[in-house]
Structures are given as structure tokens and as C-alpha cells.
Image (spheres, rainbow, N blue to C red):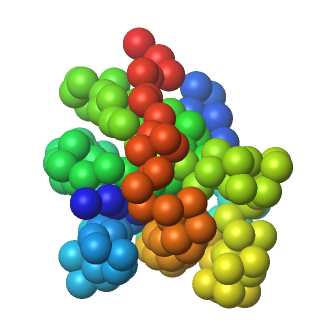
Amino acid sequence: MFCAVDTETTGVNPDRGDRIVEIAMVPVYNGKVILERAYVTLVNPMVRIPALVEKVHGIGNTEVLRAPSMDYVYPTVKTYLSSMIPIFHNGKFDLMFLDYAAKEIGDFPIDPTYLDTYEMSRVLFGKPKSLEWLAKHFSVAEKINHRALDDAVVTAHVFLKMAQIIGYERIGEFLMKWNGSIL
């Protein structure tokens, strides 16, 4: 079983204080996206969301004020990602933020074997492609909304299209091992 994952954040540098504000995980099983088993939540990042970043994903400071903090959310994330093979688009970004989250709450970071549609696109198209480009190319979506659930669902469908081209029996060739970004 696979699980498409996406995060939205306060910026792009967790080492400079940026944190996760939303996370979604969408199971993929037997070639189908299992939306009814998806997990999605806003996360209180405990830092301010800059106005420019809010314009990208539409998540504001008032929205996350009453959202659960990462110490509440992380155990569920860890359970999902340790029981399924995660699928990311540019997984290094999301996994780096998850490493920081684990460190801050005093937990061990996850070290999944995962798939990355960004890296898969490098093999299929000769260079890595954006999620929006892949979504359009495979007629999955016209644009990326930059909300975790929507983007995780798009990633799941893009992965399924790529798996059809590559062949399910060869998916194992694209597995990557995350060894962490910090500690």
C-alpha cells in the first residue's frame, strides 16, 4: 500500500524557523486513490505565517490558531508513513520539514523508503517536472491549489499514471531511502 503525502509550510527554510501548517496523506491501494481513508489537518506552526506565503496556499494565522500542534499530529503522521510507502513530489522538502518536527517534539524522525514523482519524472521525461506540469500532462488537474489534500490527491493520480507507463513490476527500481536531513 502506498500513501501520497503533501505539506504546506510557512516558508521554505525549516532551519530558519519555517514550519508545517497543513499536512495530508492519501492512501493508494490496488491502483486506486482511497480518499475516504485520507488524513488531513491544519497544524499550528507556533510561528507566524508571512503574508506572502499566505497568498500562495491561502492558510492564514487565524486559521491555524486553534489547529493542533505538531506534537499532537506527528504520531498519526508517523503511523501512516511507517505502515505504507509514502509518495511525495519533491520528497526531500516534505521529509526535511518532518525531520525538524520530530526533533522539536523530542521524537525520532521517520526514515521511510519512499517514492518521489519529481525524481520519477526525471527518468520518464529526461528532466524533473513540476507537479503542475505532470498534472496537466496526464490530464489529472489543470492547476495546483497549494493545499495539502488537493496536492496529495494530484500526486497520487500522477503516480498511478507514471506507474502504468513504467510498469508496476518496476516501481521498486524507483524506491529511495530517506536518511534524514538533521540531527
Left or right of 131, for residue 162: left
Q: Is residue 21 visible?
A: no
Which quadrant: the C terminus?
top left
Q: Position of residue 95 (x, y in %)?
A: 46, 38
Residue drawn at 70 percent across, 48 percent down:
123
Q: Can residue 63 be seen in this view?
A: yes
Q: Position of residue 62 (x, y in %)?
A: 47, 69
Residue drawn at 34 percent across, 60 percent down:
3
- In the foreground, 40 or 157: 157
Q: Position of residue 7 (x, y in %)?
A: 49, 56
Q: Is residue 96 above or below residue 23?
A: above
Q: Is residue 162 above or below residue 174?
A: below
Left or right of 21, for residue 1: left
Left or right of 37, for residue 4: right
Residue drawn at 25 percent across, 60 percent down:
1
Seen as rendered, the residue at the extreme right is 126
Left or right of 41, for residue 78: left
Tell how many labels.
Answer: 0
Q: Where is residue 4 in the image (x, y as percent from the top left)?
A: 41, 62
Residue drawn at 56 percent across, 60 percent down:
166
